[in-house]
Amino acid sequence: MSTRNTRTTWGLPARILHWAMSLMIFGLIAVGFYSAEVTQDLMLQFTLVQLHKSWGFTVFVLVLIRIVWRLMNPTPALPEAMPKRERLIAHGVQYLLYALMIIMPLSGWLMASASELQELYGIKNKVFGLFEMPDPFVPGSSALEEIFASIHFWCALLLTLVLLAHIAGAVKHHFVDRDPVLRRMIRGR
């Protein structure tokens, strides 16, 4: 079993990062939308938001590791029989996923950093309660918080749609095209 990517296989680190991040991102999307609705229980909402921030930071670190891994390793080639239009869509979806995996945690961090809650209640942006995230500007700007909240929300919706398209593409490759695209991300080859 290869640990590095080749032109025909995904290495173990790439597969672990892919599946671990998939679970985290789906969890973050679910918790993010749910925590926005749990306004009647402020303690639960606070706990969920703090977990959401911490796991969002984790995803951000992992996406940076994933990008470095991808730059240092070859990317397995798409099937030769795949039409050019589908290749362009596949590459576009991959780049959009990476962009959103960076924009989402950054916009969430900037939204939380701008929040008045930090000043009013002393709520700092902490990662799993271990360390405090720096604030790029003075907290307490509702205008900035609203801008970053809007970016975060719309990117969450877009990320959900792009992930569904990504999954649909993988299912199509496996069951319709019967090519190795999904198998390589599960077994490596």
Image (spheres, rainbow, N blue to C red):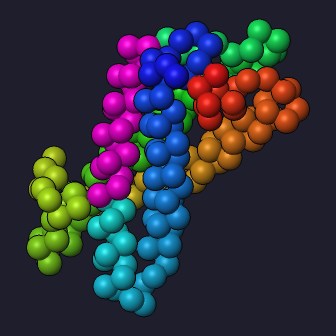
The verdict on residue 58 being magenta is yes
The residue stretch that appears in magenta = 54-73
Can residue 150 be seen here? The reply is no
Vertical side of 32 occupied by 40: above or below: below
Measured from the top left, where is residue 66 in percent x and y? Answer: 40, 30
Is residue 155 rendered to the left or right of residue 81? Answer: left
Vertical side of 118 occupied by 185: above or below: above
Vertical side of 94 occupied by 143: above or below: below
Q: Residue at x 85, y 26 (%)?
A: 177
**Toward which corner of the image does residue 111 lie, by quadrant?**
bottom left
Q: Residue at x 34, y 30 (%)?
A: 65
Is residue 104 rendered to the left or right of residue 162? Answer: left
Of residue 55 and residue 134, the one placed in the foreground of this image is 55
Measured from the top left, where is residue 139 in percent x and y? Answer: 15, 61
Q: Main secondary structure of the magenta part?
A: helix
Is residue 100 rendered to the left or right of residue 85? Answer: left
Measured from the top left, where is residue 160 in percent x and y? Answer: 60, 51
- The outermost residue toward the right is 176
Of residue 110 and residue 64, the one placed in the foreground of this image is 64
Q: Residue at x 29, y 67 (%)?
A: 50
- The outermost residue toward the front is 1
**Picture quarter with the C terminus:** top right
Vertical side of 5 occupied by 172: above or below: below
Can residue 178 be seen here? The reply is yes
The verdict on residue 65 being magenta is yes
Of residue 177 and residue 9, the one placed in the foreground of this image is 9
Q: Residue at x 37, y 45 (%)?
A: 59
Is residue 121 rendered to the left or right of residue 180? Answer: left
